[in-house]
Amino acid sequence: MLLHLRNVLTADELQTALSLLGDEAPWMEGRISAGSQAATVKNNSQLSQSSAQAKQLQSLILSALKRDALFFSAALPRKIFNPLFNRYRGNANHFGPHVDGAVMHSQATGEWVRTDVSCTVFLSDPTSYDGGELLVQDTYGSRGVKLAAGDAVLYPGTSVHEVTPVTRGERVASFFWIESMVRSDEQRRTLFELDMNLLKLRAQLGETPETTSLTGVYHNLLRQWANT
Amino acid sequence: MEHPKGTSVHQTCSPELAAKTPSNLLPLAALMLAGSMGAAQPALAQSEEKTLKTVTVKDTQDPNLSKESLLVKQTGIAKGNQQLKDIPQTVTVMTEKLIADRNYDDFREVLKSTAGVTFQAGETGEEDVRMRGFSLGQAGDIYVDGLRDAPLTERDTFNTDRVEVLKGSASMLFGKGSTGGVVNQVNKQPFLMDQNETNVTIGSGQMRRITGDFNKQTGESSAFRLNVMTHEADNWGAKADKKGIAGAYRTGIGERDEYSVGLYHLETDGRPLYNHPWMIDNGTSTASSNGSGVIVPVLNAKNYYGLTSDYLKTQTSYLTLGHTHRFNQDSALKTTVRYGHYERDLLASAVRFTTATSLSSLNGNTPLSRSFKARRGESDVLQVQSDYNNNFEWMGRKHELIAGVDYTQDKALRNNSAATGLSSAGPTTVGTPNDGVSITDNRQMAMNRFEAENLGLYAQDTINITQQFKVLGGLRLDRFSAKYRDTSNNSFQMSENLWSPRIGAIWQPTDSATYYTSYGTSYNTSGDTYQFALGSYAPGSNNAKTANTAPEKSRNIEVGSKFEIFEKKGLLGIALFHSEKYNERNTDADSAAAQQLLSGKRHATGMEFNFAGRLTPAWEMFYNQTWIPEATIDESNIVAAGTGAQGKGDRSALTPKHSASLWTTFRINPLWRLGSGLNYRGEQNPDGARTKTAAAFTTVDAMAECTLNDANVLKFNISNLTNKLYADSLYRGFYAPGAPRRVELSWKSMF
């Protein structure tokens, strides 16, 4: 499932993030966070994880995600990898097709995180750069994603994906992974659909015996599938 | 599905999945976070208290931004929190980075880097700041965090995040005052991070300054910030000694309910360099100390001719409580209460040539007379301010509503001429500055009482007519009342009801271009923070007449544009303005008797140019220029003649045609950053001396900064590089010189 989350960051937060990700920020070669197979195709810059900017940006992104009910419903997060930040421009402008490592070790928390769901938060104004599309290949074929600044996309970690070369301007984004309580993409999608449609039913009809019962179904499925 | 221009999701996910959740319900998954589980409590989903906090952080901008950039794009100066480009008036913002780069520790220095600002000296030690020739300080147009600052006091930058200047009439936002504009100092706010900084500076005039800025995150959404400062300098006699501490705690940052509490305390104890006497170059070979012509500063700017017993002592202490309630992403109610106690006590020496002196005969033995100027004032100010903002859709149009109420109570004790009872210290000579003479001060001082209250109500709506075109309209009502009582128990009362409208239109054809026009009004009551009326309020006296005069009114029309350039890293503003005071009383004690008719009229028409930001990754610039080709007194019952006050047809005093300020820095490599700046003020006439002209001047500043590592930065500053001797603030009979060349070395450490 590929899900577009709108306005994850407010205009203020976005401005803060962009100001912290200026040229003075400690950018490094992106290869350092890539596994051996991905390293051959990764050509971008990444923000030093230990910098003050990174710490502040991480808490900014995480607190924004915590506000986002859709994010929670779709990802059912158990652990969230500390958000990373990358930049594509000039000669360091693309990241060829790759699959994210199945398990990532987070420097910040020292934890291992299984990468069930990948998330990219777009930070640059999409009109300010050409190229830089996130191409995700999943079971439905390949899709290109290029979202408004402050929006985010969730997609399965299992998919092959790439970032096409940036031919003008610069593309700055935050990316990270979520280990979900529900490991399977299909199960997560089913739960999300059930949750969203129940939400609409409750909004249309109020609380009825049927919505209450279906709420029970949701939780029973989650009980079967979730690992906490 | 529609997407904003430039975004695309080919083969989007099904629309019902991407739909935003209805606002009053939350998905089941999210409810788990709220701890409400189970089908047995379906009602929980609808109860407001139990839902997750899905409010947006509508916070003042990140404090670090002002530390790191010459450009900020947001401001709270026009109430609420707006993009600079959405304000249809000229706004110049001087960030902490600019203030730190240029080593400004005094608020007046910061103001000097704003074009259009000039300084009035004297008036019994009551200096004033003018903007576009209109009073700023005397009218109480200096604010802290959007609340009125003390009328007259010394100010330091140790707790300043940025200084914002809104130019032109804005009584709809601020109530009385604001003819030339307003200046708002924004205090540093706690933020969610651990960050500490200390700064040690040594410099010319035996200056030693230490500041500390410590921010600690104390919880998930709470933080504490402490700023401290100690500053000592002997300044060749005009010594300065300042100490300050400011602490603030915020909790619930970005959440539904945010609370803050802050304490600020500043004490200053210095000796003021009150004035220097001038020579006047009248075009003949012998410049003398009187007559008409160009003012020639002759005495070294370092020279202090006052006594060691002279002093300027001020104290500022205030407590601030704040609460923000966010109803949802688009609406909030912000309430601030501040109670402050302010004291200022001045005893200074006005220095004059005792005999008519010519430039050729001036030498070290030339005598200088010294006479005392003294003034004392205390204020207790209570302010309560509540601002509501809401963005909503109505009849198919987007509205941005701001509305609020504010209350100010000012209880003051004043003695504007407090030199009675002092024995003279005798004369000195040009060649013996800082001669160490002192006197014993055993004055008994009686104080005039002044009490003022103001209640204001305002509302403004910005309506999006189309995606690109907005119109705004606002109206404010103030009820102002004041009471005076002199030392002989004569008293006087006044009250006014005043309406202030504001209208504007904004066209934003693209994301990075704004064109605007606006019209606003302002007024000045005779109960201004600084009333010229000294002494007696006996019925029929001039003071009573002055106090009895209705408010002056002004209007400002502006047409301008703001562009985001250099990949939105720079903001350029160009504006054409016409500021007009159309019923002026002359607030000048010397001619108050003749000027209580509100028959006066003056205007200033010109242009403003503003740029702040980054041209390339390494090159940053701040530029501000004001060009006022026309500034005229249109109506006055003073005839333009002789050497005295400006009359009808004269150019307004303290209004140079050109003034500009530039600061630019360039990073050569990771180790070195170099900076340079210019301040320019064109020629101007002192108020009340129409035939005397202060020459134009340019001062040059330079900086070299060496970043040793992530934690340590050394910085070397030279201000007034050419040691230019110039008349900085002007009075009709004398001037005060601008600071001489100063060299400063600072070490900043971050941990």
Image: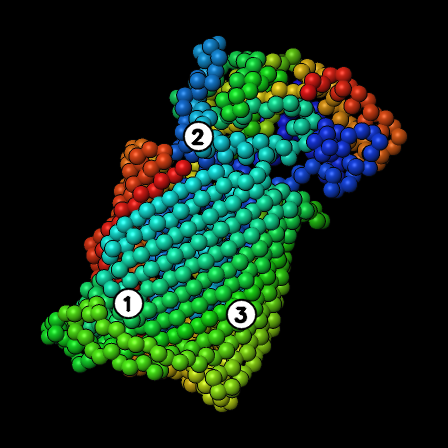
Q: Chain of mark 1?
A: B
Residue at the farthest right position: A209
Q: Is residue B21 left or right of residue A96?
A: right
Which quadrant of the rendered structure holds the N terminus of chain B? top right
State how far apart marks 1 and 3 are (Cα): 29 Å
Residue B410: give its label: 3
**Any part of residue B179 in sight:** no
Q: Which residue is found at the position 20% from the left and 70% from the top?
A: B435
Q: Residues within 10 Å of mark 3 (few under 14, many from 20)?
A: many
Residue B371 picture location, percent across and down: 28, 78
The amino acid at mark 2 is Ser
Q: Chain of mark 3?
A: B
- Assign a secondary structure to mark 1: loop
The amino acid at mark 1 is Leu
Using the image, determine if residue B675 lies above or below residue B552: above
Q: Residues within 10 Å of mark 1 (few under 14, many from 20)?
A: many
Q: Quadrant of residue B285?
A: bottom left
Residue B273: give its label: 1
- Assign a secondary structure to mark 2: loop
Q: Kindly identify which residue carries mark 2.
A: A51
Indicate which disc, 1 or 3, sits on the residue closer to the N terminus: 1
Q: Which residue is found at the position 85% from the left and 34% from the top?
A: A207
Q: Chain of mark 2?
A: A
